[in-house]
Amino acid sequence: MTTASHRYVAGYWESLWPSEPYMRHRVLVDMELRAVVAGQDRAHHRWTAKSVEDLGYMQQIPDETYRDFFSDPGTYGFDHVDAFPSWAAKAWPWPQADDTAE
C-alpha cells in the first residue's frame, strides 16, 4: 500500500508504435489502484486529453510491456506527485470536495 503522498506518479512515454504524426504521451498513474487514471497525447505541438477508452489502451503499457513498472516507476522516468497535476484534472469534471456539506 502506498502513502497518500506517494499514491500517484506522473511521467512521459514515447509512443511505442510508429505513428504519423509522432506522438508523446504524458501519463498519471494511481499506484494504489495500479491504474492509469489520466493521460494526454502530444501531436502537432499540442496536448490533447485521452478518452476513457484510450486510458484502457495506456493501461496495457505497464500491464503487458513494462511489467516491472509498479515496483519501480522511477526506472521509467516517472516521479511521485502529491496531487493530480493541473493537466490531469482538466480532462474530465472530477468530483470536488464540498465544503458546504451540512
Image (tube, helix red, strand yellow):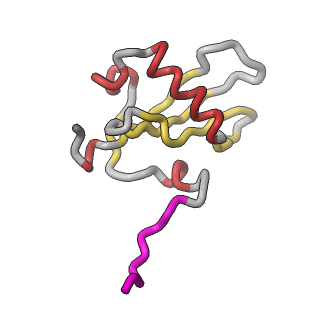
Quadrant into which the C terminus falls: bottom left
Q: Is residue 92 left or right of residue 72?
A: right
Q: Is residue 3 left or right of residue 80?
A: left
Q: Residue at x 34, y 45 (%)?
A: 81
Viewer-nearest residue: 94 or 85: 94
Q: Where residue 91 sits: x, y (%)? A: 60, 51
Q: Quadrant of residue 26?
A: top right
Q: Where residue 12 sits: x, y (%)? A: 50, 30
Viewer-nearest residue: 19 or 36: 36
Quadrant into which the N terminus falls: top left
Q: Where residue 67 sits: x, y (%)? A: 39, 15
Q: Residue at x 70, y 41 (%)?
A: 46
Residue 43 is inside the magenta segment: no
Q: Quadrant of residue 45?
A: top right
Image height of 95 relative to 100, above or below: above
Q: Is residue 91 left or right of residue 78?
A: right
Which is the main secondary structure of the residues drawn in magenta? loop
Image height of 12 relative to 3, above or below: above
Q: Is residue 72 left or right of residue 20?
A: left
Residue at the far front: name it. Answer: 102
Q: Where residue 74 sits: x, y (%)? A: 32, 26
Q: How many marks?
A: 0
Instruction: Report the magenta residues as a range.
Output: 94-102
Q: Residue at x 45, y 22 (%)?
A: 62
Image height of 38 relative to 60, above or below: below
